[in-house]
Image (spheres, helix red, strand yellow):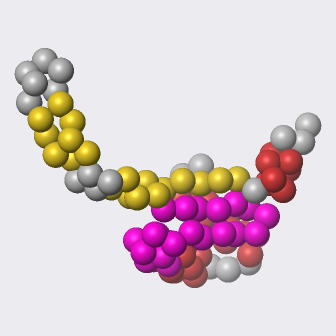
Amino acid sequence: MQHKELVEKLSKSLSRSKSDINKLMEALSNVVVERCSELDSISVPRFGTLEAVKHNETVETDEQTGKRTLMPPRVEMKFTTSTVLKKRLNRP
């Protein structure tokens, strides 16, 4: 589902304007980025948990040239689905 489609569906189901939905989604996005940049987890009941996992810097070696490169630390986002959502998605 594309952003535009999601905005349209939410707009209809919540009876709000598309501009309101866009503002709400932008605010949600800002909160997620802010919390995850501080390596906090975000848990949404009955939906799942979004967790920031920090990977330390590593040294990688190119197999062909033998050149070593220092890779900076990075933050990876990991989403774990709640059991309630899993059950709803797997219903026949």
Residue visible at 21% across and 47% down?
A: 71
- In the rendered image, residue 8, in percent from the top left (x then y), is placed at 63, 64
Residue 35, x across and y down, in percent: 48, 76
Report whether 61 appears left or right of 84: left
For the point 58% across and 62% down, the residue is: 50
Eyeballing the image, is 12 above or below 71? below
Residue at 46%, 69% in the rendered image: 39
- Location of residue 67 by image quarter: top left
Q: Which residues are magenta?
A: 31-52
User: Looking at this rendering, what residue extends furthest in the top direction?
Assistant: 64
The residue at the point 67 percent across, 80 percent down is 16
Q: Check the picture and name the quadrant holding the C terminus.
A: top right
- As for residue 89 lying within the magenta part, the answer is no
Q: Can the viewer see residue 43?
A: yes
Q: Position of residue 88 (x, y in %)?
A: 85, 50
Q: Is residue 38 above or below residue 77?
A: below
Left or right, 9 with reference to 37: right
Q: Nearer the viewer, residue 42 or 3?
A: 42
Identify which residue, 27 or 52, lies in the foreground.
Answer: 52
Quadrant of the rendered structure where residue 79 is?
bottom right
Q: Nearer the viewer, residue 75 or 1?
A: 75
> On screen, 27 above or below 82?
below
